[in-house]
Image (spheres, rainbow, N blue to C red):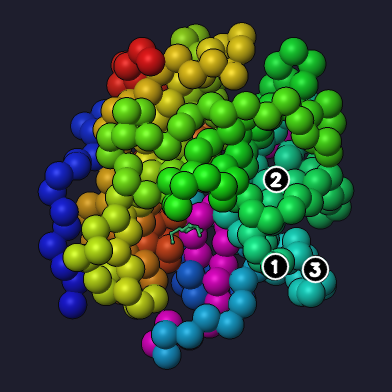
Amino acid sequence: MSQTAPIEWKTDPAITRHPDNPLLTAEDVPYHATLVFNAGVCKYEGRYVMVFRNDYGDADAKRLDGVNQGLAFSEDGVKWDVAPKPLFHDQPDHFMYRLRDARLTVLEGKVYMTGWFNRRGVVAATAVTDDFERWEILNVGVPSNRNHVIFPERVGGKLIRLERPFVGRHDRFDTYISASPDGRYWGDHELLLPNDEAFLPWVNNKMGPAAPPVKTEKGWLAVIHGVDIDPARKGWGWSGDWPKRYSAGLMLLDRENPYKLIGLCRKPVLVPEPEYEYEAKGYRDYVIFPGASILEDSGEVKIYYGAADTVECLATAHVDDLLALCEPV
Ligand code: BMA
């Protein structure tokens, strides 16, 4: 039985969910698919491209057997054609086949994909392509790191990324920023966004970077995710005891120096509300997990997000409204 949605936070009125949500579900996929969610999306060579996570198994039997990544293309960012086979379908033992939560960044004519996989812990990996067929693996880290996203421009001649290692206080992990000459070697790490109540009053558990940041007149706007947890909540979704709610928030980084946090929204901007984000049909209910934000020439920002770890959705907002939500830090 589904439970009543918590009421303490609401999606900001600046954000509109797409009426066709969920945009992509297992039913749209021409191979074995069960949970289709947490996609990376970019605009590349005149069309939208999506790499989505597919956890396949048997939802009726409440069983998952494996994971791969699907590829989909779209002319408008709303209606998607899924490629006939998953990425790396010919190498199912390779970690790239099992990568999860892809984020895509177009940089200097190539597409950088970041994601994570399980190998004696959660390991972050980065690969680059220009055709979605041949991939060069640039970097495979050590446990435990997840949620890393690359900026769409070099700053000071370097690639820049946000990352969220599993270090520090239990579950309240911080977001860091780092730089690289080539996407392979990363250094210059600095703490960027501490997971403290003073910064994020709506989070009492994990947080991390969500979508790769977009460049605006006021700075780098980055969608983040944050979790609030209440042990009294139980049984959200069919995965088992799931007491966490994942929502989306915003931060703003200096345009010239993204190592400087200049703005933060002190409340979540997108909170699980409609049925497809929390109804008990989902794997883990009350989850919004954004993986992409695309700034259109019109000023519209498309925010793609996995919902309930089960389907892929879209919400939109005007960039000026999102910037207005970021208070100076
Ligand atoms: C996070 C990641 C995401 C997932 C989320 C909610 O820790 O594993 O892939 O969407 O939990 O289950």
- From the viewer's perspective, is residue 58 above or below residue 97? below
Mark 3 vs ligand 1: CB below 8 Å: no
> At 52% across and 32% down in the image, what residue appears?
294
How far apart marks 2 and 3 lie (CA) works out to 16 Å
Residue 144 percent coordinates (x, y): 64, 54
Evaluate whether residue 151 shows in this view. Answer: no
Label annotation for residue 113: 2
Q: In which quarter of the image is the N terminus?
A: bottom left
Please say whether residue 45 is one of the residues in the magenta stretch. Answer: yes
Residue 273 percent coordinates (x, y): 23, 52
Count residues near mark 2 (Cα–Cα under 10 Å), then give few for <14, some for 14-19, many for 20+.
Answer: many
Label annotation for residue 27: none
Q: Residue type at mark 1?
A: Arg
How far apart marks 1 and 2 lie (CA) works out to 22 Å
Return the residue at label 3. 94
| Left/right of residue 134 with respect to residue 57 in the rendered view | right
| Left/right of residue 16 with respect to residue 8 in the rendered view | right
* Label whose residue precedes the other's in the sequence (2 or 3): 3
Residue 310 percent coordinates (x, y): 42, 66
- From the viewer's perspective, is residue 215 above or below residue 25? above
Residue that protrudes farthest toward the front in the picture: 169
Q: Foreground residue, 29 or 218?
A: 218
Count residues near mark 3 (Cα–Cα under 10 Å), then give few for <14, some for 14-19, many for 20+.
Answer: few
Q: Foreground residue, 196 or 96?
A: 196
* Label whose residue precedes the other's in the sequence (1 or 2): 2
Residue 45 percent coordinates (x, y): 71, 35
> At 27% across and 74% down in the image, what residue appears?
235
Label annotation for residue 120: 1
Q: Residue type at mark 2?
A: Met
Task: Find the magenta span and give its range.
Answer: 36-60
Q: Which of marks 3 and 1 is in front?
A: 1
| Left/right of residue 95 with respect to residue 196 in the rendered view | right
